[in-house]
Amino acid sequence: MYALGETGGMTDIATFGETMLRLSPPRGERLERADALDVRVGGAESNVAVAAARFGCAATWLSKLPDSPLGRRVTADLRSHGVDPAVAWDDSASARLGTYYFEHGGDPRGSDVIYDREGASVTTATPSELPVGAIEGADLFYTSGITPALSSTLADTTAALLTAAQGAGATTAFDLNYRSKLWSPEAARAAYTSLFPHVDTLVAAERDVHTCLDREGDAVEIANGLLHEYDFRTVVLTRGEHGSVAVHDGEVFEQDAYAAAHGVEGVSGDAFVGGYLARRCNGGGVADALAYGAAAASLKRTVDGDVAVVTADEVEAVVDHDAGGLSR
């Protein structure tokens, strides 16, 4: 039996996807010997929602969670950052929350991630049990390629929600977010391209475009080629330390990466996407949004965990200190 979560008020940005608990031993300890684990909440789409909320947007995250203390840990954490969770609660005997174990490393060993997400409640989420009204009332809807990779049910649900959002007049945004542990490049390509007709803004790491869409060459040429082939409104390519490139409305925009400390491990791509989308929702142009995203990603690299616990003032201070963008 399922009960829907509640959403309140108008929504600037709605996201949909899986969120898990991240369990990590203290730095310098191995999982096999650890007697304590740090617990954090993280997932691509909820990370983006958190960043957007912290940067002034009304953000809603949709998903399906077990009706248990673990599920409630997720919603409590997201609410603490200003995100409105709109959740289908799973009270079945098989209900579970995905987890992953992150072991800090370093040269020459590197860090390691072990996933335990098989059969998570979210993999059975269907449109009929989700509060789709939260999407239809949003200005922007975002999801990523991780979500359809988790199950055939979620692949269908992702397509249905993108279609519903676009039909309601929302701008739809999709990040390839390729994960080799979830599927092959060939399977990912087939799924991505089936969703592209329902996507207005494509965000992708340059490496994912190479791996999954067989695009090589200059980043600007790749972005322009994708925009015209799939009729996107905007294409944003992230290039790590080389910054980002976007094409929109006949213009090309390039943004340098901002310098950041490298002593903290965690994802910064979601902070970039959250910063970019938040700025666009708040009326900023593409160049402004790229700078905002780059600054958010830089600041995230100073914060442990998956969530960008940074402020709009901090982002703006980075942008104001070093305007490294180029529009042509």
Image (cartoon, rainbow, N blue to C red):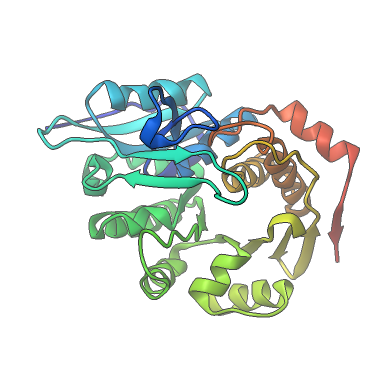
- In the image, is 174 to the left or to the right of 309? left
Q: x%, y% of residue 170?
A: 50, 50
> In this figure, what is the number of numbered marks?
0
The foreground one among 176 and 53 is: 176
In the rendered view, tell whether residue 152 sits above or below residue 165: below
Residue at 73% x, 47% y is: 294
Residue 75 lies in quadrant: top left
Residue at 77% x, 51% y is: 257
The foreground one among 133 and 321 is: 321
Residue 234 lies in quadrant: bottom right
In the rendered view, tell whether residue 140 sits above or below residue 3: below
The foreground one among 27 and 175 is: 27
Q: x%, y% of residue 274?
A: 60, 42
Quadrant location, the C terminus: bottom right
Quadrant location, the N terminus: top left
The foreground one among 34 and 244 is: 34
- In the image, is 206 to the left or to the right of 188? right
- In the image, is 33 to the left or to the right of 282? left
Q: Is residue 299 visible?
A: yes
Residue at 43% x, 68% y is: 192
Residue at 83% x, 32% y is: 317
Q: x%, y% of residue 216?
A: 63, 80
Q: Is residue 134 visible?
A: no
Q: x%, y% of residue 271?
A: 61, 41
